[in-house]
Image: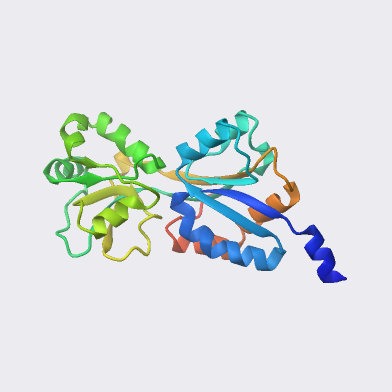
Amino acid sequence: MVLHTVAAQAADIKVFVTGAARDAFNALAPQFERASGHKVSAQFDLPPSFLRRIEAGETFDVIILSMDVDGLIRQGKVVADSRTALGRTGVGVVIRRGAPKPDFSTVDAFKRMLLESPSVTYSGEGSSGRYFLTLLDRLGLSEAIKPKLRTPTGVGGAPQMLAKGEVALAVIGRPPVVGVPGVEWLGWIPDEIQSWIVFTAGLSTTASDPAAGRALLSFLTTPEAVAVFKAKGLDPVAP
């Protein structure tokens, strides 16, 4: 009778997950399923793609983005009181393991590194990638760096390009890099040009089972989940 009741109440939760949180979510989803009896169906993509899909009318239950869900709340797509902060990452420099380590300890050194590098990749339409392009404009480097830019394809493409030796360095957030063999994280870019990216989640206003969606959001803020996010490159952050 108990098993029948659990099965009757179990929900299939459709989750849109930003690619940078893929590894963390894949580690956490089975834990949530075992604890709740619900099933999670995750789709991974870059934030702009999800936003286009939502604008086109595609439905979801829970969304996790490498940006703030406030915009979706204002559009009436995400329930206002469901906004959940999961962690944050900054922008840093990554090279192929064993390659010479460039100096980027100051803004001038960072600019010199980019100018001297034969090729540079970034996260494309990912949050850190979009910031990097605006940073190039801000530093007056867009024209000089544009011929060297290598735009990755797919989620997690930049670290894979590095590992294969297809590009010299990447300017990217930390989560996509954690655990990728053949690459080395060197650290954050200087504070003066840093951008801390907060990952947030929220419940769809059209969620098929709002209680199940909220249960998932609550699970993602447990100490155990926070530890997984941290191990995957997301530092804890206040709500």
**Please, is residue 18 above or below residue 27 in the view?**
above
Q: Residue at x 38, y 55 (%)?
A: 176
- Disc count in the image? 0
Coordinates of residue 122 in the picture (x, y in percent) = 30, 45
Q: Residue at x 69, y 37 (%)?
A: 205
Q: Is residue 138 left or right of residue 3?
A: left
Q: Is residue 194 visible?
A: yes
Q: Is residue 229 visible?
A: no
12 and 193: which is toward the camera = 12
Q: Is residue 156 left or right of residue 209?
A: left
Q: Quadrant of the N terminus?
A: bottom right
**Please, is residue 201 above or below residue 130 in the view?**
below
Coordinates of residue 76 in the picture (x, y in percent) = 65, 30
User: Where is residue 162, by image quadrant?
Assistant: bottom left
Coordinates of residue 220 in the picture (x, y in percent) = 60, 57
**Please, is residue 81 above or below residue 134 in the view?**
below
Residue lying at the far right in this picture: please name it.
1
Coordinates of residue 124 in the picture (x, y in percent) = 34, 41
Q: Residue at x 51, y 63 (%)?
A: 228
User: Where is residue 69, by image quadrant?
Assistant: top right
135 and 40: which is toward the camera = 40
Q: Residue at x 18, y 36 (%)?
A: 145
Q: How is the image coloured?
A: rainbow
